[in-house]
Amino acid sequence: MEPIQAALKKWLKESKSFQESYTKMKSEILQAPEVKKFLEENNELTPVNIERQLIKLYEYEYQSKRCEKCESLEKCCNVVQGYVPKISAENQQITLTYDKCPRKARADEQKRKNSFVQSLYMPRELVEASFSQISLDDPERFEAIRKVERYLHDTEKGLSRGLYLYGPFGVGKTYLLGALANALAEKEIQSLFIYMPEFVREIKSSIADSSINQKVDRFKKVPILILDDIGSEHQSAWFRDEVLGAILQYRMMERLPVFFTSNYNLKELEIVLASSNKGESETLKARRIVERIKQVSEPVGVLGENRRM
């Protein structure tokens, strides 16, 4: 009998401890300002109703309602990350519903806007590129900045020509177009940002899985196309004529703008594009590409000091 009596005494002791803890917890919940206010506004709830649904009051009280208990969205302490409880009562039943917290709402909105900027390769520092971070103290870059900002301001007019930004390494050409892509996303205008060497590799790899036509169509039809570092890629005559040429031809005919960055002016780019093979025919084909570039963009020189050093 002794073991049974010992077990019974232990149970009674733990039961008493549990009862004390429960009573303390109940008192804290019912004295919490927001719970008190809720109960005052819903005075049809009887003590029995409240007792039976105390767990809902507990769930409401110990969660953050205005992000005040959370360091960040990633460290949200609530039952459902990024969602805050709202409490109501009807027919003596307490109901909890959940809405997005301010941080979750902002994060989702930013994610939605970011979806307007697609990229085959976009360096991490360009994901948050902004005109507010671009210095205007360099007169050699001022004309390019002015033209990009003017394009952004006039997007509603349906402009058919983009810009061809050329100049030496590190003067901010790519960052400037990254800021443009992000600003266009704020206006819910879709853009596709492509790093040209990666573009060539992507097209080559798509030949094997027969997705090349689908990908080329995407580049043809996106509202804003941004080709970063054209001329730096090692491309074949086939890529130049059948891929790049086809994309530029389509966009020229459909009056869709293209933005470029390059270390070469258009005359120099023509030489680069013609160097894939030898012969007069290659020079003519390269010149045809450059003429299409002129149709879909306006050349603007970007000088200044190397900001990467």
Image: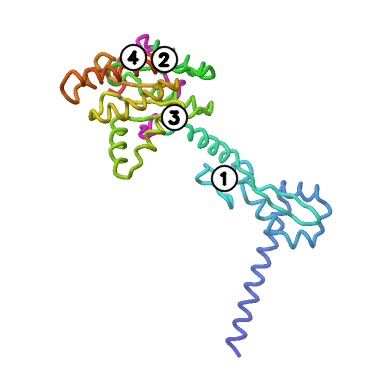
Q: Write the residue at 83% across / 52% down.
A: 43
Which label lies toward us, 1 or 3?
A: 3
Which residue is identified by label 2? Answer: 145
Task: Say which element carries label 4.
Answer: loop
Q: Write the residue at 35% across / 20% down.
A: 173
The colour scheme used to paint the residues is rainbow
Q: Write the residue at 75% across / 61% down.
A: 51
Which label lies toward us, 2 or 1?
A: 2
Instruction: Name which residue type carries label 1.
Output: Gly
Mark yes or no: residue 133 visible. no
Q: What stretch of residues is rendered in magenta? A: 119-141
Label placed on residue 107: none
Of labels 3 and 4, earlier in sequence is 3
* Viewer-proximal residue among 102 and 126: 126
Of labels 1 and 3, earlier in sequence is 1
Instruction: Name which residue type carries label 3.
Output: Lys
Q: Quadrant of residue 260?
A: top left
Which residue is identified by label 1? Answer: 82
Q: Position of residue 45 (x, y in %)?
A: 81, 56
